[in-house]
Amino acid sequence: MPAISRPERLEDAWRRQHERLVRRIANLCPIAPETILEVGCGRGQITIPLAERFPGAKITAVDRYRGPYSEDRDQLAARLARAGAACRVRVIRADALEWIYHRKLSQFDMVLSSEFLPELDAEQMTGFFEGCLRVLRPGGLTAHLFLSPKARNARQRLVIDADSDPRWTRYPPRQWFSPPPLQAVQNLTAAGFVATRAQRQLGGLAVRAGAARRLLKQWGVRPVFEKVYEGRIQKDGLELPDWIIVHGTRPN
């Protein structure tokens, strides 16, 4: 797939990626969920396609809205209004790890996150999965999306470095760019989930020139990174790694 160079095309490319991911998740559901918890909702990349895919569901969306994502809540509100879904989505500004432990037991049919696990370390991920199990109803599904920590080419490796190396990013991760998929699956199983699995979805989103610069700015990458790799970004561009979906079911 040719690399996107125009910044205004980046948003539409992201939208198509997330719509494909939500379709994959919907295929995992034996019945349509009535209550959904989304952790780390951000600008609504997953929230909007979830609301469209499950029009009968009530969605609770939680996010801290800190760092490079501090203004995303306003964007989510505008998107929900345009999609006609504002009345079905309750947005909560809170630390999800604390919030989830104060919820009632067996409250949701589905618990999802997108790019939330990379913000956690191994210990926090274990506790988060235990919280997911706690608030899910028996038979409920949990699914977590994140970019693969393993690059398939040099363009993907450059993206991983830009978003994880403290030399380049203003917001270095606690432990990793993304958790190893096998470890995430093992932690889901240890938390008590069954039918745990990791699936891969090929990414294919490549950007260069202005689109690459916009992506790096959104991720909080320092300008020095662009100066060092200006030639590669302009000519070859950057490419997002593949998507990983780890999921499991709460036993009945």
Image (spheres, grey):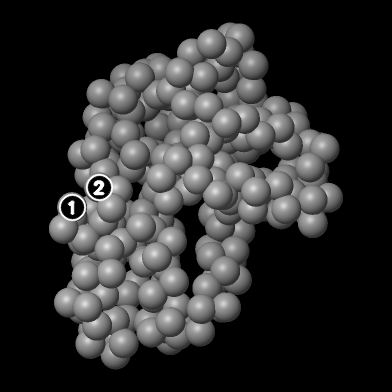
**Compared with residue 138, is residue 72 higher up or lower down, i.e. above or below?**
below
Taking the image as shown, residue 229 lies to the left or right of residue 185, namely left
Q: Quadrant of residue 11?
A: bottom right
* Residue depicted at x 48% and y 22%: 132
Q: Position of residue 129 (x, y in %)?
A: 40, 24
Q: Do the residues bearing badges 2 and 1 touch, measured as CB atoms within 8 Å?
A: yes
**Compared with residue 234, is residue 18 higher up or lower down, i.e. above or below?**
above
Q: Which mark is residue 166?
A: 1
* Residue at mark 2 to residue at mark 1: CA–CA distance: 5 Å
**Label 2 amino acid?**
Pro
* Residue depicted at x 71% and y 54%: 79
Q: Quadrant of residue 90?
A: top right
Q: Position of residue 153 (x, y in %)?
A: 23, 72
**Nearer to me, 13 or 55:** 13
* Residue depicted at x 62% and y 30%: 92
Label 2, secondary structure: give it.
Answer: loop
**Compared with residue 30, is residue 230 higher up or lower down, i.e. above or below?**
below
**Nearer to me, 122 or 212:** 212
Q: Position of residue 182 (x, y in %)?
A: 26, 39
Any part of residue 43 in sight: yes
User: Which quadrant would the C terminus be assigned to in this image?
Assistant: top right
- In this figure, which residue is indicated by the disc labeled 2? 172
Q: How many marks?
A: 2
**Label 1 amino acid?**
Pro
Q: Position of residue 246 (x, y in %)?
A: 41, 40
Any part of residue 202 in sight: no
Taking the image as shown, residue 61 lies to the left or right of residue 238, namely right
